[in-house]
Image (cartoon, rainbow, N blue to C red):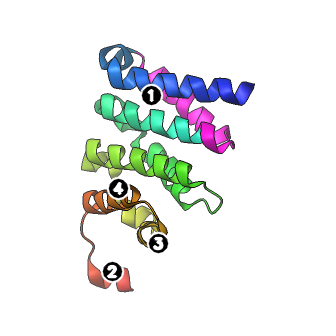
């Protein structure tokens, strides 16, 4: 089946990113473009989850190579988090990839700051802390909130 093949390919790419980082650095640009294209068109939740996990590993492995596409990656990851029909595995994968991107990208690559660019991001993250059953997932959301940093309280209230 085509979906299982795509899911397996994404899983293999994720494992290659983790265990063969020097190999992936050479081919980062075409791999990243392929992942972005697949993420925009994939509706199947398990495949999308594997693609998001592979994206997170690629970001962890080759942070400097993905910085030029940081804003586009952020768009895709926030959209995956805010998607109302998102499965919990897809949301967790998007959260993992978002954490990797926020930890590895320079502040100039993510300008304007994510809270300014996505005003509903904080609400989405806080809602997932409240509704998430898994302690590990709540911890992951807390790490993302910590990496995003503090807010100006007066700006957020307005």
* Figure check: 14 above or below 47: above
Which residue does the numbered mark 1 point to in the structure image? 14
Q: Closer to the camera: disc 1 or disc 2?
A: 1
The Cα atoms of the two marked residues, 2 and 4, are separated by 25 Å
Circle 2 Cα neighbour tier, 10 Å, few/some/many (<14 / 14–19 / ≥20):
few
* Figure check: 141 above or below 93: below
The Cα atoms of the two marked residues, 2 and 3, are separated by 20 Å
The Cα atoms of the two marked residues, 1 and 4, are separated by 19 Å
Image quadrant in which you'd find residue 83: bottom right
Camera-nearest residue between 98 and 69: 98
Q: Closer to the camera: disc 2 or disc 3?
A: 3
Q: Mark 3 or mark 4, which is nearer the start of the sequence? A: 3
Q: Mark 2 or mark 1, which is nearer the start of the sequence? A: 1
The Cα atoms of the two marked residues, 3 and 1, are separated by 28 Å
Is residue 53 highlighted in magenta? no
Which residue does the numbered mark 3 point to in the structure image? 127
Q: Mark 3 or mark 2, which is nearer the start of the sequence? A: 3
Query: Marks 3 and 1: CB-CB under 8 Å?
Result: no
Residue 102, given in percent of the width and then of the height, sits at: 32, 49
The kind of secondary structure element at disc 1 is: helix
Q: Residue at x 36, y 13 (%)?
A: 23
Q: Which mark is residue 155?
A: 2
Res. 62 visible in picture: no
The kind of secondary structure element at disc 3 is: helix
């Amino acid at each position: 089946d085509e979906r299982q093949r795509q899911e397996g390919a994404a899983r293999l790419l994720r494992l290659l990113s983790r265990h063969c980082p020097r190999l992936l650095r050479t081919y980062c640009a075409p791999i990243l473009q392929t992942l972005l294209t697949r993420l925009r068109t994939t509706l199947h939740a398990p495949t999308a989850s594997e693609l998001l996990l592979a994206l997170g590993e690629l970001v962890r492995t080759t942070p400097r190579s993905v910085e030029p596409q940081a804003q586009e990656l952020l768009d895709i990851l926030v959209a995956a988090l805010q998607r109302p029909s998102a499965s919990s595995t897809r949301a967790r994968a998007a959260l993992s990839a978002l954490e990797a991107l926020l930890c590895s990208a320079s502040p100039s690559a993510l300008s304007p700051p994510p809270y300014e660019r996505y005003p509903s991001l904080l609400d989405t993250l806080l809602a997932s802390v409240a509704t998430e059953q898994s302690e590990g997932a709540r911890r992951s959301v807390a790490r993302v909130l910590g990496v995003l940093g503090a807010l100006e309280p007066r700006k957020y209230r307005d």
